[in-house]
Image (cartoon, helix red, strand yellow):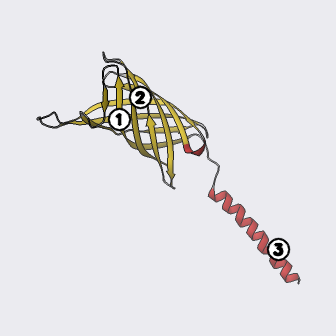
Amino acid sequence: MKKWKLTIALITGLSYFGQLQGQSQSEPAPVYHQVKGYLSFIIPMVTFNKNETTTQFEKATTIGFPFGINIYYGEKFGFSLEITPTIQWSQPSGGQSTSKTSNVLFDPGPMFRFKNNFTIITRLAFETQGRYGFTPVFNKVYLKTKDVNYFVALSLPARFGNSQPASVGINLQFGFTFN
């Protein structure tokens, strides 16, 4: 009888110790400041100004390739610096198709992180085309893996300057962060 009690106590103790070890190894408490890089691509779906509405694929095809770093100061707040070179392809009717790097955007801003992997980023915008403005971004991580987190984002760029009418757009972005 004593052997059974000793065996049960030993198994219970080892089981409890194993649970503690499993908990500490499976989810360590995050340590802040964290710096993570990311890559993505962005498609400007539509842009509105007082003179016209421009949609993707209408006159040209434009795609941006944002890359940057996110600095996480805590669970709910961070800072992001994004640089986006943009390539544009066009084919005038009856003309030769062209492609070019049309712009580079510098886009810094604070990140406000919420539950369910949702983040709002309020970016400033400085373009090499001479335009400037701001870009609110609504970002959602939809898949987490050990090495990479995949995200989708909707951004609403507002631009001013360079003797052009003010504009507002809707962009769709897909990318991944490195863990």
Camera sees residue 116: yes
Q: Mark 2–mark 1 contact, CB under 8 Å?
A: yes
Percent across and percent down for residue 31 are: 61, 45
Q: Earlier in the sequence, mark 2 or mark 3?
A: 3
The residue tagged 1 is 44
**What distance separates the C-alpha of mark 3 from that of mark 1?**
64 Å
Quarter-of-image position of residue 1? bottom right
Residue 109 in the image: x percent, y percent?
Answer: 49, 30
The one nearer the camera, 161 or 26, is 161
* Residue 157 badge: 2
Q: CA distance from mark 2 to mark 3?
A: 64 Å
Q: Nearer the viewer, residue 13 or 153?
A: 153
Q: Secondary structure at mark 2?
A: loop
Residue 9: numbered disc: 3
Sooner in the amino-acid sequence: mark 3 or mark 1: 3
> For the residue marked with disc 3, what is the amino acid?
Ala
Relative placement, left or right, of 64 versus 74 is left
Q: Residues within 10 Å of mark 3 (few under 14, many from 20)?
A: few
Three-letter amino acid code at the position of disc 2: Pro
- Looking at the image, residue 61 sits to the left or right of residue 124; the answer is left
Real-space Cα distance between discs 2 and 1? 9 Å
Residue 179 in sight: no
How far across and how far down the image is residue 28, in percent? Answer: 64, 53
The structure residue drawn at horizontal position 36% and vertical position 30%, both measured from the top left corner, is: 105
Disc 1 crowd rating (10 Å Cα; few below 14, some 14-19, many 20+) is many
Kindly identify the residue that appears in the image at 35 percent across and 36 percent down: 45
Callout 1, which amino acid?
A: Pro
